Amino acid sequence: MINYARQTQEEQPETPAPFEEHIAPAPRVSVQAFCETVETAAAVQSAGEDRRLGKAHLKIQMGGMAAAIEAYRSAPTPNVIVLESDARNDLLAGLDQLATVCDAGTRVVVIGRINDVMLYRELVRRGVSDYVLAPVSAIDVVRSICNLFSAPEAKAVGRIIAVVGAKGGVGASTISHNVAWAIARDLAMDAVVADLDLAFGTAGLDYNQDPPQGIADAVFSPDRVDTAFIDRLLSKCTDHLSLLAAPATLDRVYDFGTDAFDAVFDTLRATMPCIVLDIPHQWSGWTKRALIGADDILIVAAPDLANLRNAKNLFDLLKAARPNDRPPLYCLNQVGIPKRPEIAAGEFAKAIESQPVVSIPFEPQIFGAAANNGQMIAEISANHKSIEMFLQIAQRLTGRSETKKQKSSLLSPLIEKLRRK
């Protein structure tokens, strides 16, 4: 058993609210839980359905410590054992017995009801990886198991942000690209945009990039996908922003299996703090999987009835499929088209039971100029009001409130003009 324990509630700093914290997904590991109460078994079962334990193989048994010791007398131990016990002396004696039948690399998580720092330290001394106070919720179990595989000295696992339109033509790609720009420029986070619309993607045009390789090379060669291979496919847009471009050609049909992008996403997580997925408006196994598996989601909608219906359907499905995550965010785009009847933001909020992050006005001149020039809105007009909206979205999606402004100098205006040229 490996001594890899977290601090107790008495010793650790105050943690953020569950919806605000970022819990990295667990790798492909085997987990066996031995519970004493039905309530704990139900919480562990619910945790096994969480997206972050999607790759883990979870098995639940009743009987607690005694059942675990008996089970491993004649069977190898899994990567993780979760034990429920509420008796101090029986727990310590049981762990000593378990150690005689437990493989060296197995990690043990104990769920107990005794809130005692001395007990915690004794558990650590015996090699217990984590001690969680009962009663536990599903997110407590998810956090405990996932954190076993996120060493504090390791580089943080990247956050995946998925952006999708409630309807085609609502500007979801434009918003995703400008939000990624804000994440990289204003929040100073290294980010990558993955354009998943392989046939008609516009990220290459919007960032004025024409790389010879892109995401299609990775999807069609899953056996080759690793960090070095992905690095070769990335196109550098700025110091902090890279692009995994779509080919945007029709010389092949892009039919994918449900897990076609898994290797790409896993590799990007290991190398980039922030990954923005530009998801096309289509409904398939892989798009649904990408949305549900993302850490945060932004739905882009225009203020009409079809968008309201579709946004509501997406919102409800994603909330149900991700019970331990915060709900998706949504924004309204193309608001105020002359002579077009619109559904007010308040009506959207009433139907979806959530307020939009921002409502972006319809300004075809500046957005059209940016699209045709291969530039972001911030490059066309540094003080345009939509830039602040993109930053608000970026802050909500990443959980960061501070902005990293570059130091200005007398040469800054000249440098900016040369950069635009």
Image (cartoon, rainbow, N blue to C red):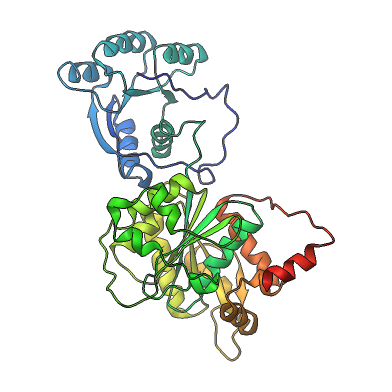
Q: Is residue 418 left or right of residue 278?
A: right
Is 327 placed left or right of 250 in the picture? right
Can residue 280 be seen here? yes
Residue 231 placed where, x, y %?
45, 53
**Where in the figure is residue 18, as x and y percent of width and height?**
51, 42
Marker count (numbered)? 0
Residue displayed at 70% across by 52% down: 404
Q: Nearer the viewer, residue 328 or 375?
A: 375
- In the image, what residue occupies the spot 54% across and 73% down? 206
Identified at 58% across, 63% down, the residue is: 179
Is residue 160 or residue 345 the one in the foreground? Answer: 160
* In the foreground, 347 or 17: 17
Q: Quadrant of the N terminus?
A: top left
Above or below, 333 against 260 in this view is: below
Task: Look at the picture and state if 373 lies above or below 1.
Answer: below
Q: Quadrant of residue 361?
A: bottom right
Q: Quadrant of residue 90?
A: top left
Q: Is residue 116 above or below residue 169?
A: above
Q: Position of residue 240 (x, y in %)?
A: 59, 55
Q: Nearer the viewer, residue 93 or 152?
A: 152
Instruction: Classify residue 105 as left or right of residue 158.
Output: left
Q: Which residue is most to the left? A: 74
Q: Is residue 228 above or below residue 40?
A: below
Residue 344 left/right relative to 105:
right
Task: Name the image quarter holding residue 140.
Answer: top left
